Image (cartoon, rainbow, N blue to C red):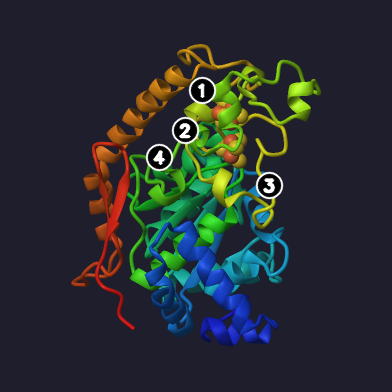
Amino acid sequence: MGALRSSLPQALRSRGVSRREFVKFCKLMVATLALPPRYLSAVEKALSQATRPVLVWLEFQDCAGNSESMLRTSSPTVSEFVLELLSWEYHELIMAGAGKQAEDALERVVREHKGQFIAVVEGAIPTADGGVYCTIAGKSALEIARHVCTNSAANIAVGACAWDGGLVRSNPNPTGAVGLQEAVPGLNVINLGGCPHNPTNTAAVLTHYLTFHEMPALDQFNRPLFAYGNIIHDQCERRAHYDAGRFVEEWGDEGHRKGYCLYKMGCKGPEATYNCPVVRWNDGTSWPVKSGHGCIACASHRFWDTKSPFYKRLPSVPGFGVDVDAGKLGLVLTGGVAAALGLHGIASAARAQMRPKGEEPRGPTEIARPSGLVEREGPPEKS
Ligand code: SF4
Ligand code: F3S
């Protein structure tokens, strides 16, 4: 932490990260952002030259799971790149300073980097009784969020709690907890839902921002389409078993051992969107369904209330286990995503607001087709 304003390669070299690992990271980012491979050199160049923007990470009502998720990746670490992509000036969990020294650091960023720094928010914000249920240094989370996030260049809400209130907001919600967007209306917020967020997606959002000077295209919940635009069921490696009617009937049965579909065990994959089947967790090692547990739709809106009980099978999926009806199901869900993408214009407008004034878009433009597919068009790569 501190005023580290060197370039990313300089910072990585000082940590012993090789050029080869840097290129590998850039390739991962291009793949995660679903950019054509020709964008690799643009990403490499942008990250090599960028002076790292200042970042502050605010933590409110949470379990610190999103910080942990980011810090617990293995080597060569995505977290190392995320930590070095930006100049971290404030993060309660990992900063050495505490008390007044820490609070002064936050104030200094707001004062000296007004309109230029990135604010990451983790955790829900209580609004009941004047916000007294979460205070830091005598100020409520609501006060801090209003003060910091209205003075930043961009705000990123990581995890379910910061997006829509998450577990803290689930019924009966005694503290009146809400997500950042609801707590401070009118803010430009990128929501990285999930419980926790996937650090590879967070790194990809930051990479997009540093490369194209704008945030990626968003859906109706202000979530990046590259990460939340596809249904889990359609990306799932167990889908062939679903289509053929082969299901796990009981935990530990033969079907479970053989990797059959987890639909009957309550998997919410047919109703959930996220890229975890592709990006996976623990540096691409696995994801819940691969490890034998159904998806609980942790990246869906208000999932603690809307998707529980987690082990109860979805009640109204038409014709499960029959090839032709599974196809119809896909169409129904794709229609839902297409409807969401119909709001793409609104999201693009929000994205444009985050671009510096007078600057043309530099990144690829995403176009939602009626089929629900998202196609990307963009300016030719400049070398
Ligand atoms: Fe995969 Fe779940 Fe769909 Fe089965 S129901 S194919 S386990 S996402
Ligand atoms: Fe969450 Fe389901 Fe992926 S529970 S991590 S969205 S498989």
How far across and down, in percent of the image, does residue 297 sit?
55, 32
Nearer the observer, 53 or 235: 235
The picture places residue 307, in percent across and down from the top left corner, at 55, 23
Q: Circle 2 sits in a helix, a strand or a loop, which is it?
A: loop
**Mark number, residue 182:** 4
Marks 1,3: beta carbons within 8 A? no
In the rendered structure, the answer to whether residue 382 lies left or right of residue 86 reads left
Q: Which residue is mark 1?
A: 306
Residue 173 in view, yes or no: no
Mark 3: secondary structure: loop
Q: Are the residues flagged by discs 4 and 2 in contact, CB closer than 8 Å?
A: no
The three-letter code of the residue at mark 1 reads Thr
Q: Decide: few, some or many residues near mark 2? Use Cα within 10 Å; few <14, some 14-19, many ≥20.
A: some
Q: Position of residue 133 (x, y in %)?
A: 60, 39
From mark 2 to mark 1, how far is it between C-alphas?
8 Å
Q: Nearer the viewer, residue 58 or 66?
A: 66
Residue at 30% of width from left, 61% of height from top? Answer: 354
Which circle marks residue 301 in the picture?
2
Q: Earlier in the sequence, mark 1 or mark 4?
A: 4
Secondary structure under badge 4?
A: helix
- Where residue 286 is drawn, which disc sits there? 3
Q: Are marks 2 and 1 in contact (CB under 8 Å)?
A: yes
Query: Which mark sits nearer the N-terminus, 2 or 1?
Result: 2
